[in-house]
Amino acid sequence: MKHSVQVTILGQQYTIKSQLAPEEVRKVADFVNGKLAEVEASHKVVDTLNTAVLALLNVAGEYLDLSAKEQADEDARQRLESLAEKLDKACEQSGKSG
């Protein structure tokens, strides 16, 4: 079921229709406002479009970093599983010969 939620971003009110619960939509809006505030504070940007673009670039960079870390974690997990299988086989072989 879609919900309509009013949020304010950069002083502008928006009605968002989403499958998410209203609290989740508000959390997303709060996150966006936080990122915009970070850009405004660190870059002294007054143009809202530039603020939004810089915030979006920051979020995209963070996303890509997290994606790369997640992939590295998945690769490590697969290597560990492979090593565990080899260890199990070695233990089985050792048990049969001993």
Image (cartoon, rainbow, N blue to C red):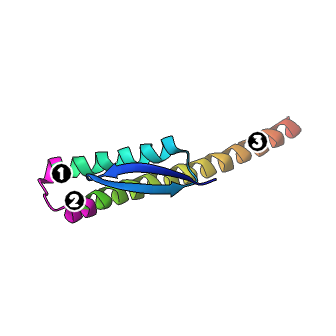
Image coordinates of residue 80 in percent, x first then y, are 62, 46
The reply, left or right, for residue 13 in relation to residue 92 is left
- The magenta segment is 41-53
Mark number for residue 88?
3
Q: Earlier in the sequence, mark 2 or mark 1?
A: 1
The reply, left or right, for residue 37 in relation to residue 87 is left
* Amino acid type, label 3: Asp
CA gap between label 1 and label 3 equals 56 Å
Quadrant position of residue 50: bottom left
Disc 2, SS: helix
Residue pointed to by mark 1 = 40
Above or below — where is 94 with respect to 67?
above
Other residues around mark 3 within 10 Å, as few (<14) / some (14–19) / many (≥20)? few
User: Residue visible at 30% across and 61% down?
Assistant: 57
Of residues 52 and 8, which is closer to you in this image?
Answer: 8
CA gap between label 2 and label 1 equals 6 Å
The reply, left or right, for residue 10 in relation to residue 88 is left
Image coordinates of residue 53 in percent, x first then y, are 26, 64
Q: Are marks 2 and 3 in contact (CB under 8 Å)?
A: no
Image coordinates of residue 97 in percent, x first then y, are 86, 39
User: Residue visible at 50% across and 53% down?
Assistant: 72
Residue pointed to by mark 2 = 51
User: Residue visible at 23% across and 47% down?
Assistant: 37
Other residues around mark 2 within 10 Å, as few (<14) / some (14–19) / many (≥20)? many
Q: Quadrant of the C terminus?
A: top right
